[in-house]
Amino acid sequence: MAAVSDFIAIVGERNTITEGSELRTYEADGLPGFRVRPAVVVLPETTEQVAACVRLARALGMPIVPRGSGTGLSGGALPVEGCVVIGLSRMKAILEVDLPNRRMRVQPGVINLNISRHLAAAGYYYAPDPSSQSVCSIGGNVAENSGGAHCLKYGFTVNHAVGATIVTAEGDIVSVGAHGGEPDTLGYDLMGVFVGSEGLLGIVTEVLVRILRTPQATRTIFATFPTTDEAGAAVSSIISAGIVPAAIEMMDQLAIEAIVAATRVDWPLDVGAALLMDVDGVAAEVEHTADAAIAALRAAGAIEIRSPRDDGERALMWKGRKGAFAAMGRISPNYYVQDGVIPRKEIVAVLRDIARLASEAGLRVANVFHAGDGNLHPLILYDGRIPGQEALAERVGGEILKTCIRYGGSITGEHGVGFDKAAYMGDLFTEDDLATMQLVRCAFDRDVIFNPNKVFPTPRLCGDRPGIYHPHAAELAEVAGRG
Amino acid sequence: MTPSSVEELSDVVASCNRSGERIAIEGGNTLAGMGVPVRAPYAHLRTASLTAVVEDAPTDLVVAAQGGITLRNLATQLAAHGTHIPFDAPLAHQATLGGTLAAGWLGPRRHLYGRPRDYVIGSVAVLADGTIARAGGMVVKNVSGYDMSRLYVGAFGTLGIIAQANMKTTALPPHARIFIAPLPEGTRRRALASVVSLRIAPAAAFWVEGFHQSIDGEDGHEGRLIVLLEGSAALLERSTRDLRSALGRAGVPETQILDTGAREAFGRIVDAYVSCLGERSVTYRISAHGQSLVDRVLAARLLADRFELRADTLADAMNDDIILRVSDLDSHALGAKIAMFDDAFHDDEPGATVVAGAHPQRASLNVWGELPDAFDRMRALKARFDPNGTLNPGRFIGGI
């Protein structure tokens, strides 16, 4: 196959995947239910190799699907037929640590948690902490503008990834945002729009991240409530009082049950909801903020408020929370995770609506989410062996998104639009809004070579040129035959 | 033209775009000294009548307001329920929300509270063809589609006019305190180093030389240190102790403390960033990140001295920003030297930008410093958003 040998010439045989079982890994990401076999997968090791692969794919008329660790939950790395998947997992070097300027330059395949591990001894860390942080990559985080529990206080990837080297649709290597120690660069905020662009504007091959000093003190608070109503009201009152914990996570009864079953946490099972909070900062401020938060929890009707006995228990509590999705396996054969955002004052009302939707559908929904940000993660539990249940779960998920929109919210807070939610973009934005976003895409990738069929609800071209030719899989098979 | 609704704004812009008329967008005119004036001829479009607070949700810590509202009016409304947005932009009574965002203003407290753009959660922009484009929303976390609002921030209106911005707000710090101390030459490096490494970071810290008319305070001729502390009473008590002992160790003489009027005093420092002496001055802003702040201030002052220009400097130690205002006795005297000074200064500081100065020669200076690596991509964006060059043509970097 001519194409394959050309890719091998760039990245080497070891880094080119064309065979069945190995290729299968790349047929899907963390979004269940969809699989598409790519024509070829390449795993470049350098920026120049990425650029050469992009130029080759372009010359061959192959769409390109960039991929980090493949943990994304919206199908952002789902291949399209006949595409080349450019996986960044071999680019995992930490290139530079600049403590005086609080910057670190890394390759995109570096695992999120490894940045903080690398810095721990020096007393620094990287703030965005998606629950998948032990496996997701920083490049994927940039593509998705990933969040995490502690983003409530510290902001999202867009606030911490300050510069990048990207490979453009033409195969050029361009630096965007900050690239040295300087805090801000001149011109349009390309880095700001690149973060969260879901692989549609280019491939990130180096990331410059901001690192923070490890807080002097952290206090973790765990509080239980009779129902999600009181827990939701507690969150709203903490936010409206201007108290800023580092994180406020909510778990309902089902989520607690799953977490307890999967870990050794001794959380009570006879409560309707729990909040897990971190308050951090300088010691003087932590006590002040924690006291104010505890008063708000009490006033909202908390049953029990406690703090972990030691760092070990604290770590266990957070491990429980961050492993909540996986823990669903303890209480249900399958689950479908949704990601929506609502104004924080609407938590109680929206959780009630979700419960009603679930009950009408005859399914259970567990809720475990970033309550401080209003970022819901309803987990719709179903049994895939029962015909029709998977589709039903997806329908309930869709109804939940529409509920979020109705309350003035959004269809995704951190998992991205990807393939999964492209159809809902039209519910959130007008045609003019979407056409304006398309202007950005066309300025970066006028032939729509990067990650086609993602984010936007209908296929779009850029007007001044015909779109790139996407060969059918069968055609590619024929190409293979010619090779 | 002073449209009073977003729809009217859209009609006006669309009509100009169709007829080939260029538009110069004007907010509060407080940051007009940044960048290059719009290429004439043009029609003036003022946002002064777009002043509504569209949605105020204090319990959710979000607010949406039209682009023409002044920062002071917005701040007054937010302060009524104990919140604020730390814009730290000069002349808040005149500066507008849209203009401040469009200019990408960066203030001295951003190291602690983040940049204004970090508070933007959504926007309504009017594009060159009159399209009313919404992005983001009223929620604090949102990754639905491209983060378009970020593109309008810092774009100087060249991609679209910020008709409305949706912003996060944050609790107003309950207490503020300002320290003023003389900063004799021998204490500078140690004092500044100790202030920036305090465990409880000050909200702002400046080393000021000059700017006497703009900033109150007894400073003699040796310059002065001004530190702003903010937070709860307990935090302020602790940080005051820490700061006093750090400055004492650095050899800084007795400090003066200002509690009443601390915020006003801070406001005057921010105003000084763009304070002009008519046509007698030009003000530069440079970022000293990663280099010695003191060395770069001294080098800039020395260079000004070589050209027999008066130098006023304001060094923001927490963000490593330097404001340098060079001036002369009259406009002619400045005019005779400023182009040569500008060249020499950019040899040392290629990233220096001009932020204020009404001198006729301003447009011929290197007001933006060196162009960024991704400039071609920026030009491509402009071509997509505003193919006729209707919005603020020539105002931005590289003639965009």
Image (cartoon, coloured by chain):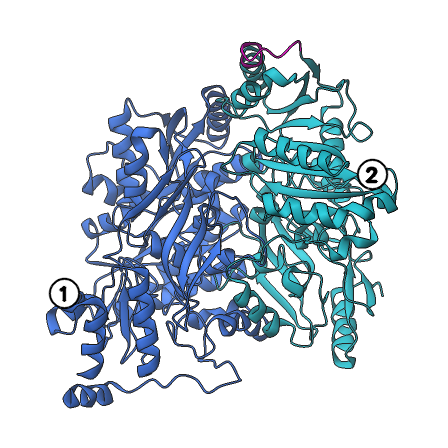
Chain colours: A blue, B cyan
Choose top left, top right, bottom left or bottom right for residue A388.
Answer: bottom left
Q: Which residue is mark 2?
A: B328
Q: Position of residue B333 (x, y in %)?
A: 85, 43
- Range covered by the magenta-colored residues: B246-254
Residue at figure coordinates x 27%, y 32% from the top left: A315
* Residue B248 covered by magenta stretch: yes
Is A306 situated above or below A349? above
Residue type highlighted by circle 2: Asp
Q: Secondary structure at mark 1?
A: helix
* Relative side of B327 to B381, left or right: right
In which quadrant of the rendered image does the N terminus of chain B lie? bottom right
- Say above or below: A335 vs B111: below
Q: On what subunit does the disc labeled 1 rest?
A: A
Residue B74 location in percent, x, y?
Answer: 73, 44
- Position of A167 compared to B329: left or right? left
Whether pointer 2 and pointer 1 mark residues with C-beta atoms closer than 8 Å, the reply is no
- Residue A225 shows up from this direction: no
Q: CA distance from mark 2 to mark 1?
A: 67 Å
